[in-house]
Image (cartoon, grey):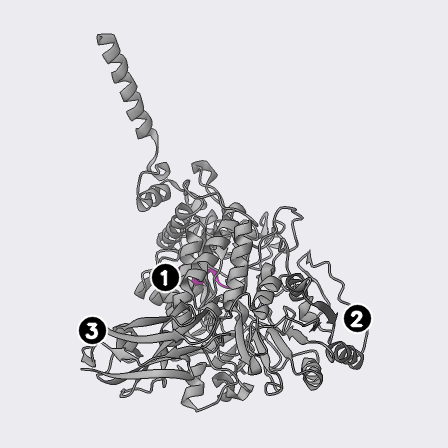
Amino acid sequence: MKLKSLLLSCSFAAVLTAQAAVPVYLDRSKPIEDRVEDALSRMTTEEKIAIIHAQSKFSSAGVPRLGIPELWTDDGPHGVRPEVLWDEWDQAGWTNDSCIAFPALTALAATWDRDVSRLYGKSLGEEARYRKKDVLLGPGVNIYRTPLNGRNFEYMGEDPYLAAKMVVPYIKGLQSNGVAACLKHFALNNNEVNRHTSNVIVDDRALYEIYLPAFKEAVDSGVWSVMGAYNLYKDQHLCHNRYILNDILKGEWGFDGAVISDWGGTHDTEQAIYNGLDLEFGSWTDGLSQGTNNAYDNYYLAMPYLKLIKAGKVGTKELDEKARRVLRLMYRTVMDNNRPYGSLCSPEHSEAARHIGEEGIVLLANRGNVLPMKLDGRKKVAVIGENAIKMMTVGGGSSSLKARYEISPLDGLRKRLAGKADVVYARGYVGDTTGEYNGVTTGQNLADDRTPEQLIAEAVDVAKDADYVIFVGGLNKDNHQDCEDSDRAGLELPYNQDAVIEALAAVNPNLVVVNISGNAVAMPWVDKVPAIVQAWFLGSEGGNALASVLTGDVNPSGKLPMTFPARLSDVGAHAVGQYPGTPRNDGSNIVDIEYREGIFVGYRWADKNKIQPLFPFGHGLSYTTFDYGKATIDKTEGSADDVFTVSIPVTNTGDRAGREIVQLYVSDLKTTLPRPVKELKGFKKISLEPGQTETVTFEISRDDLSYFDADKHAWVVDPGKFEALVGASSRDIRSKVAFKVK
């Protein structure tokens, strides 16, 4: 018995010794902050330097001596980018790095559906996790200031409230997989032309009311990393900007994650040390000619930083803080042993991509109820246009993908209409015939030497006796369209498409124009075309999603997340003459761009100046109809700290089930400073069967009534009269109710 007790005592002591031998930084039972501080205390200065800059195009070093692994990032706002070579942008040649391409973020924003946003993030995060990525570079929430911005398709529209409410579920879904979202591009990156040299001049009110809210909401909800922007603000590049990164992001907002530079966004070692950058990627330095073994050693936060420390010119306080934030990011991702394994190109992800696309497609016009297509007795459907066959997942910049597959609009319609109608195709126009980006190829041969006249003649011949004509055009991912590093040349459609549409409208009354783009486009033929559909870039399942909506299998429910202007001069940035900016005369390459329109961006500008848009913000039709009753409010007077509850009954008055996005706007009728005519402050997407009524409720809080007072540097509510406006778009207000704030 004594022997048994002795053996048990020895065993227990051995367990205690073993437990004590596990250092805190490896002890999964300890809080992350304790583990971070313990790891930091064990690292040498050289090891701290190693983890705050890249070691390859998309990875940063770990601490091998301590068993801390590398951190792997990847582009991925709409899908996980294929693998590239260690030090080049060209493809690595893997055969297992394809992905499901999800719809572009403009399409997600057009769903106005928080549940769909979470599904998007969760599905994308599962693919990233399976591919062993720790940080996914996205989502983007830069504001749609001009429809010419080549990268608008990667963002969530013109309204800060909509972008803020839609980005949070995406981030939560993504990070539930143990993969960090990297929110971008922080901040004021609203054009691609001169993106490395634009110095944005903006007043504090516009900064806080328009350009920062979506970022702040994401930070408040727990995003793990943020990417700096390329441009400048107050003459400092935004990847190391004291005002934006230190004062606002880390100071006012209390962000505890890591700030990551955009690739090539770092320009100065001392600014990078002191102005908020934590992890440097992609700087274009030539290390080999500088006497280092590889270029990454010569990054601004690499050997140049270490040399300053060893020379006693800078201290290590800032280094410790950067390493602490990078370690915290590691513990939330690659050091989390409980992360799920993820999945890649699953049937569930295909279904998610299709569902997101169906929910985001916007029916802009439908005169005479041309849509949905009525197939009884119809025999011929003519599909016209290059975008009906062109792959859209390749190209566009860092969002370019190697999709496992991509269903084109033509293939989607042929599949859906098989056995019901003959689908014939004509090119109509020739645009971008390339099909390659950084080594990813479409495999399509789109070369066509016919003249525009010949192409139109063929299209007219095919269309004139068709029961339906579906023109599929718009933009693509080519330079000066929807593409990184270049802006659009103008608002109009490229490649002579307007002439094609005009010719088709003249020979067939059942014409449907499907615009595929991430931006608004001019439509000089708008009154001649009965049905217009905004289809965005819809990814792998794009053709299937479009066919579902056109045939009525899915009732369209998307709404525009941006205003479609009739002309470019109707846009604030262009009306005030502040795009693309004014080059300085001081010998530098800096271009100053002043946001003189201030807070009046998008529908706010159109409302203020009584401009009729082509299609307003929040617009989108359905195959059914919805009746809005009378809005009511629970109290007509209260303090700024009270919550006002607005209710309105909405009824499906049509003959088919549908989904409606009910929108709440707030107007300040008596204010000290100029305010927009109205501002979006709530939205709910509801599903109704024919004849069904649902009462929709919104809560209006202090945040919804406030404006930013720059002099006080505070959010302020002026006492006085307000109105709550409820409607189907920013220009289709169905009911309103007044209330007073004491």
The percent coordinates of residue 285 (x first, y second) are 58, 58
Estimate how packed mark 2 is, as few (under 14), some (14 to 19) or many (20 or more) residues with alpha carbons within 10 Å: few
- Magenta stretch in the rendered image: 267-274
Magenta residue check for 269: yes
Q: Indicate the amino acid at tag 2.
A: Asp
Question: Which residue lies under the disc numbered 1?
Answer: 219
The numbered mark at residue 641 is 3
Question: Which residue lies under the disc numbered 2?
Answer: 448
Marks 2 and 3: in contact by CB < 8 Å? no
Q: Could you tell me which secondary element the residue under label 1 belongs to?
A: helix
Magenta residue check for 550: no
The numbered mark at residue 528 is none
Quadrant where the image shows the N terminus: top left
Q: Residue at x 40, y 42 (%)?
A: 43
Q: Could you tell me which secondary element the residue under label 2 belongs to?
A: loop
Nearer to me, 91 or 451: 451
Nearer to me, 301 or 12: 12
Q: Is residue 562 visible?
A: yes
Estimate how packed mark 3 is, as few (under 14), some (14 to 19) or many (20 or more) residues with alpha carbons within 10 Å: few
Q: Is residue 193 visible?
A: no
The percent coordinates of residue 2 (x first, y second) are 21, 8
Marks 3 and 1, the one that precedes in the sequence = 1
The percent coordinates of residue 712 (x first, y second) are 26, 78
Classify residue 242 as left or right of residue 389.
Answer: left
Q: Indicate the amino acid at tag 1.
A: Val
Marks 1 and 3: in contact by CB < 8 Å? no
